[in-house]
Structures are given as C-alpha cells and as structure tokens.
C-alpha cells in the first residue's frame, strides 16, 4: 500500500515539474531565411539576436528607433506597454490562425482555405492604396476595416464588438499595432537576409536596423497613395449594367480570369493557361473569385469594389485597372458585378427596353 | 472516530442547499429574463430543480444517516443480490418522474419550438418566406442578414450585420438560422433561446423581447478552435431606433465615396 502511495506521489511530482513549465515564446525564422542561411548557423544566430534586439520578443515587443517614421505618422500608435497588451490579445484572438510570428501558420491554419494571411512579406490584399510598387502597403484604416468587418467568405471573423465594448476600448488598436509590428519585423528579416546574400556582407544589427528603417518608410509612403473615387457611383440602371458587361468581356479583360459567366473559371476554360498566374504572393493557388456568389473578401460596398478593380488585389494576379479603365467605366463594372449574383451574368447583355 | 465520517459528509448537502438558496439574492442565478416565454422556461427549470432537490436531500440524508448509525460496529456489510420489489420501485419512481416531466413540459416546448404552433404573425412571415432576419453561423462569427426595404432576403438591398443582432422591442421577431460549415448553437441566455444551427438545414426561431438593452449572443456548441470568440450581441431597441439603425447600416453599405474626414472625426479616428 505504502509503495503505491509513494508511486502516486512520484508520478504527480514528475508531472507537475515537467508539465507545468511554460515554454518560452520565440519568433521563428522564416523558411526563406532558413533556406538562404542553411549552411551558416552563425549567421542564423546573429540574425535571430539582431531581430530580438530590434523588435523584442513576443512577451516584450519593442518599438525601435528604426521605425520612428511609422510611429510619427501614427501608423503604430501604442507605446511599448500598449504593444505588450496588443501582443497578449494577439495570442488570445489571432495566434491560433496567424501564428506566433505572424507567419499564418498557427495550429488551425492547415484546416483553412483560404490560408490565414502571412504578414511577413508586408503584403496585404485589400488596400485603399495604389501606385508603385504594385505591392503597395495598406493604410492603418484598411487593416482596421478588415478587423471590424472580417473577410467574408474566409475564416477571418469580425472583431467589431471588441471595438465598441468599454472593457476592450482601445485594445483592438493595440492588436493592430502589434500586427503591423509583426509585419515590419518579418519584412525586415527577409530584406536583411536578401541584402546579405546579394552583397555577400555578413548580417549585422546595423543591417537589420537599416532595413527596418526602409520598411517603416514604405508604410509611411503608402499613406500618401490612398485612392478614392472622385465621383459618386451612377445609378445601377440597365444601361450602366450593360456597359459594365461589355467592359467585363472586352476592355477590362475580367472574363479572362473570372470567366465569361463570372463563375471564376476563366483559367479552366483557357486552352493555353498562363502557368505563372496560378500562384499568389504566398505560394497558395490563386483562384479568381466566383462573382455569382456575391461574397467579396475585401468588402461589398461599392467603394470596396471600386478599389479592388481600380487598385487590384495586392499579391495576387488581380491587377490594378487604374490605367486601363476610366473612373466611370469602373463604376459601370461595379454596377454589373453587383448585379451578377441576383440577375445572372448575362441578364444585361441585351437590355430589354 | 468512525462516526467522524458522517460529520465530514454532513456539510456537503447543507452547503449545497444553502448555496442554491442564497444564489438568486447574490446575482448568481439565471440571467435577466427579457422575453415573453422566458418565464415559462424558468418555471420548468424551477420545477425540475425542485424534484432534484427532494431526491438529493433524501439520498444524502439516507447516506449520512447510515454512515452515522452503522459506523464502528466491526462487522462487514452484507452483500445483497436481487431484491425484486426494491429494484422495481427505484426504477418505477424515476421513470414516472421522467414521464411526468416529458408530458408536463410539452405545451411550453410546443409553443416555443413547434412550427405549426408559432404565433400567427410569425407563421405568416414564415409562410411568405419573409422572416425578419437570416442568421448564418460560421466559424467563427454570426453573419446576420436583414431583408432591407423590399422585405425579401437574398436581394441587393439586404443589410448585413456582423455579430450584432438588432431587434425591435415588444414585437414577435422571427429569424431563419443556418450554418455555413459545422454545428453551431444560437444561444440567447436572456431570452431563454437556444437552437442548434445545422449545416444544410434552415431552422426558424422566434422570440419577443420585452426590455430594451444589449444582451449576449453566444455560440453554445463547441465549433472549433475559435469557438471562444464566437460572441455576438443582441440589441433590443424601440421600433424607431431599429428602423434608424437599419437605414444607417444600409447607407454605410452603399457607400461609394471615401469619407471626407472632418476634424472631429480625425480626433476619434473613425475607420473608413
């Protein structure tokens, strides 16, 4: 009997000591870095240390001087304490899909289509910004719009009630600040490794700092590139919809990808598909949206659709049409696209009156 | 010494009953009831609680009595196999109670859940296929679709709300519940409404709010990793403010121009 009790105590003690030690939280190096630096353990270590020195750890994220321009432009609004709160809530709400490092590789991620966003290349699909480079950064408001409205048709839910509730006041802003920091950190890592490989220079803290400055500036630059329609949308009358249908099939080249019947099957019908076009920035299969569903990942407001057509969807084959199409033509397209789920893709091909 | 065990066990039933007795006064009891049929559900709950209390006190009493009475006699307990009359009674009495509960609750269940017995205006809305709103549960949010001006769901003027279910006060409100992916459960604790959302099924749910305010909407079926954040709100408001909210949401949904930020807006940082 005594030996049994002793055995039980030992088992409990072992479980207690071994099982309850919290695992230290650490950002992981990206696949890209690991690949590029695969023969150089020393460089990996230096990179890791330089990133910790610049951006901190998941528990104590830092606001380095290098990204001061983004802080001054109010792209990141929290101080270091606020970021720590944001990081904590990020782990509570976001990490199970987007991962501890913002690599879109949390424990739920393998089950999701489309995949959760990997922030680390600094590309976000749904932005109000346009211009060069084509992978223009979003504004802070764009990201908040996604947080508040989710991404319909994907697994990204809306967090609006946390924005309104007094208990959580300001916390969603802190989470967003932390997400932007993760994105900057990831892009800095990639840029530093890229520079080091290209120039043959060893990675240093100084190099990481310089790259971080550049990344922060690209966020600031995007703030100047917000595109908004200058005229309101015309009424969705049959003429406008018919013009939209014509543009869809011809000048806008929408049918090439989205298909003549708007089912997102343009590539499947193409006898000579372009193989470079089937992957997005993140290496996932890119799929033209089935427009008959009436579900738009980036939002369904006319303003959202205008921006998707005008500015493209960043990181995907959906290119900006701002040069190709005039503003009123884009509005006709918006009217047509919005009519598809309800009236069918061909309803306006022959105006009935 | 051996009698001590009965003293150790005695506080358990006493504390349990005391806890239940003081819970309502302490605010540890059921959430505020704000629906018309909520009190009927609560009555059923209290009835079952009463039956269970009697059974609990009786069994605990017998247990503790036996612990006290027969402790320390130095003899082993008798093992009795088969006692027909005893087994008959301990089967028949609980079975009788269960049958009683099943029959007694039937009218309440029928009035709330059985489609043929819905209130006339609710039944009429459903027969015209024009419910007040459609709730689409999905991992991990409530996507709530109002019919808009034409009264039809599934047209371009539908108003879509996320996690916020607005309903007018003192009006029968009927919704169509669906699921996009897995099982969810639409749970309004303050309304005593709980209904599973099943993929492939369209399930009508009705209720009437009696008090203005904001209450919780939860998912009550473990639906995946993000189940814990599948939270919403139900906002019960006057018909006028409900209509105003619908109108405002529609305006926002139809927005085609970026907001020109005024100085006041820039201060509160309204996201576009």
Image (cartoon, grey):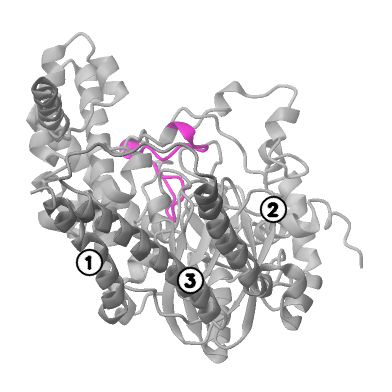
- Is residue A23 visible to us here? yes
* Residue with the mark numbered 2: B201
- Numbered tag placed on residue A249 in the rendering: none
- B73 displayed left or right of B128: left
Residue B13 in the image: above or below residue A10: below
- The alpha-carbon separation of the residues under discs 2 and 3 comes to 28 Å
Please give the chain letter of the residue carrying mark 3: B
x 31%, y 42%: residue: A95
Question: Of the residues tagged 2 and 3, which is closer to the observer?
Answer: 3
Q: Residues within 10 Å of mark 1 (few under 14, many from 20)?
A: few
Q: Quadrant of residue A7?
A: top left
Element under label 1? helix
Cβ atoms at labels 1 and 3 below 8 Å apart: no
- The alpha-carbon separation of the residues under discs 1 and 3 comes to 21 Å
* Residue with the mark numbered 1: B15
Task: Give the residue at the far right of this rendering.
Answer: A353
Circles 2 and 3 on the same chain = yes
Span colored in magenta: A110-132
Residue B118 in the image: above or below residue B75: below
Please give the chain letter of the residue carrying mark 1: B
- Numbered tag placed on residue B45 in the rendering: 3
Q: Position of residue B125 (x, y in %)?
A: 75, 76
Element under label 3? helix
């Amino acid at each position: 009997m005594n030996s049994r009790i002793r055995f039980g105590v030992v088992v409990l003690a072992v479980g207690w000591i071994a099982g309850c030690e919290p695992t230290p939280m650490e950002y992981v190096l990206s696949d890209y870095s690991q690949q590029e630096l695969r023969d150089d353990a020393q460089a990996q270590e230096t990179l890791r240390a330089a990133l910790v020195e610049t951006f901190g750890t998941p528990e104590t994220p830092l606001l380095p001087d290098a990204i001061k321009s983004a802080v001054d432009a109010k792209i990141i609004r929290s101080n270091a304490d606020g970021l720590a709160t944001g990081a904590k809530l990020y782990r509570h709400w976001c990490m199970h899909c987007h991962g501890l490092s913002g690599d879109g590789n949390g424990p739920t991620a393998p089950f999701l289509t489309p995949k959760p966003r990997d922030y680390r290349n600094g590309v976000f699909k749904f932005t109000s910004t346009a211009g060069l480079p084509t992978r223009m950064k979003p504004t802070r408001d764009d990201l908040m719009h996604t947080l508040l409205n989710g991404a319909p048709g994907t697994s990204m839910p809306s967090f609006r009630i946390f924005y309104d509730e007094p208990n959580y006041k300001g916390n969603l802003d802190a989470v967003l600040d932390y997400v932007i920091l993760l994105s900057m950190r990831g892009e800095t890592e990639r840029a530093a490794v890229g520079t080091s490989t290209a120039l043959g220079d060893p990675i240093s803290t100084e190099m990481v700092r310089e790259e971080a400055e550049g990344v922060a500036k690209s966020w600031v630059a995007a703030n100047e590139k917000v595109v908004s329609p200058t005229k309101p949308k015309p009424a969705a009358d049959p003429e406008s919809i018919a013009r939209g249908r014509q543009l869809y099939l011809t000048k806008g080249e929408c049918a090439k990808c989205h298909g003549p019947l708007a089912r997102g099957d343009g590539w499947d019908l193409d006898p000579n598909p372009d193989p470079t076009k089937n992957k997005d920035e993140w290496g996932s299969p890119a799929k033209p949206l089935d427009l008959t569903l009436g579900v738009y990942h980036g939002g369904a407001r006319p303003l959202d659709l205008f921006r998707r057509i005008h500015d493209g969807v960043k990181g995907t084959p959906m290119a900006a049409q701002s040069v190709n199409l005039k503003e009123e033509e884009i509005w006709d397209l918006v009217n047509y696209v919005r009519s598809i789920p309800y009236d069918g893709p061909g309803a306006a091909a022959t105006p009935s009156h | 010494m051996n009698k001590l065990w009965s003293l150790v066990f005695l506080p358990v039933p006493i504390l349990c009953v005391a806890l239940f007795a003081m819970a309502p006064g302490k605010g540890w009891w059921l959430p505020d009831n704000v629906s018309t049929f909520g009190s009927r559900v609560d009555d059923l709950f209290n009835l079952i609680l009463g039956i269970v209390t009697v059974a609990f006190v009786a069994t605990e009493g017998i247990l503790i009595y036996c612990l006290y009475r027969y402790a320390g006699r130095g003899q082993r307990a008798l093992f009795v196999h088969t006692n027909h009359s005893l087994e008959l009674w301990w089967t028949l009495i609980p079975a009788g109670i269960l049958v009683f509960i099943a029959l007694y609750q039937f009218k309440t269940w029928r009035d709330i859940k059985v489609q043929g017995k819905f209130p006339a205006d609710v039944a009429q809305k459903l027969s015209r296929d024009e419910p007040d709103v459609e709730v689409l549960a999905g991992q991990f949010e409530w996507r709530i679709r109002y019919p808009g001006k034409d009264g039809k769901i599934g047209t371009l003027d539908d108003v879509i709300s996320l996690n916020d279910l607005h309903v007018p006060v003192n009006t029968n409100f009927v919704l169509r519940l669906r699921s996009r992916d897995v099982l969810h459960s639409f749970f309004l604790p303050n309304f005593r409404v709980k209904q599973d959302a099943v993929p492939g099924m369209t399930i009508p749910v009705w209720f009437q709010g009696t008090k203005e305010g904001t209450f919780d909407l939860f998912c009550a079926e473990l639906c995946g990793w993000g189940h814990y954040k599948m939270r919403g709100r139900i906002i019960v408001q006057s018909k006028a403010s409900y209509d105003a909210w619908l109108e405002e949401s529609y305006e926002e949904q139809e927005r085609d121009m970026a907001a020109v930020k005024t100085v006041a807006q820039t201060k509160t940082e309204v996201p576009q």
